[in-house]
Amino acid sequence: MLDKKDRSPDLAEFVIQGITKDGTSFRPSNWGERLSDMLSTTGHDGRILYSSYLRPMVIQGIPSVVVRFSLETADPHAFELVRQFVVTNQLTVRAGRRRADAGATGMFPTLSMERRSPKNNGW
């Protein structure tokens, strides 16, 4: 599914599940937040704002990360890092929502914005 040739053109996103191909839970338990941090920013109140391209979620009790295929166009390097993470850790991937169902999912923070800004974090 991560390769273009295996991808349905009407899919908007895919879901990385916290389960390895042999059926065990992937550790550490906060892997989704760690992976999603690479595209997150910090808001004015110091809270983490996850990008709409890459969001940690718990789906049916399984820690997961939802990845929009549009990330591949917006930031090919980030998409490749996600793909390598999945392959290296042998994680389960399944189809997400279709383009018609996904619609706009909120903010798309600037990818080059420095989330660990000295100004925002009082350094």
Image (cartoon, helix red, strand yellow):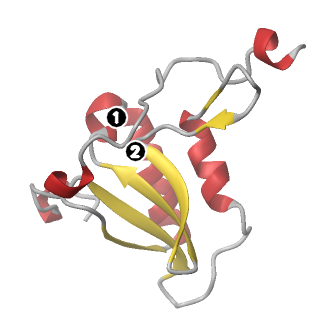
Residue at image position (70%, 19%) is 44
Reading the image, the residue beneath label 2 is 80
Say left or right for 61 vs 79.
Answer: right
Circles 2 and 1 in contact, beta carbons < 8 Å: yes
Quarter of the image for residue 47 reads top right
For the residue marked with disc 2, what is the amino acid?
Answer: Glu
Q: Is residue 107 above or below residue 101?
A: above
What percent of the width, then of the height, locates residue 10? 11, 56
Q: Is residue 77 above or below residue 45?
A: below
What percent of the width, then of the height, locates residue 92? 43, 76
How far apart marks 2 and 1 lie (CA) works out to 6 Å
What percent of the width, then of the height, locates residue 114? 63, 18
Q: Which element is circle 1 on?
A: helix
Say left or right for 57 vs 27.
Answer: left
Say left or right for 75 vs 84.
Answer: left
Quarter of the image for residue 75 reads top left
What percent of the width, then of the height, locates residue 18? 56, 73
Frontmost residue, 109 versus 93: 109
Looking at this view, name the residue that lies furthest to the top.
Answer: 119
Residue at image position (73%, 15%) is 117
Reading the image, the residue beneath label 1 is 76
Say left or right for 94 vs 119.
Answer: left
For the residue marked with disc 1, what is the amino acid?
Answer: Pro
Q: Is residue 74 above or below residue 83?
A: above
Q: How many marks?
A: 2
Q: Is residue 79 above or below residue 15?
A: above
Question: Considering the image in quadrants, where does the N terminus appear?
Answer: bottom left
Q: Which element is circle 2 on?
A: helix
Quarter of the image for residue 93 reads bottom left
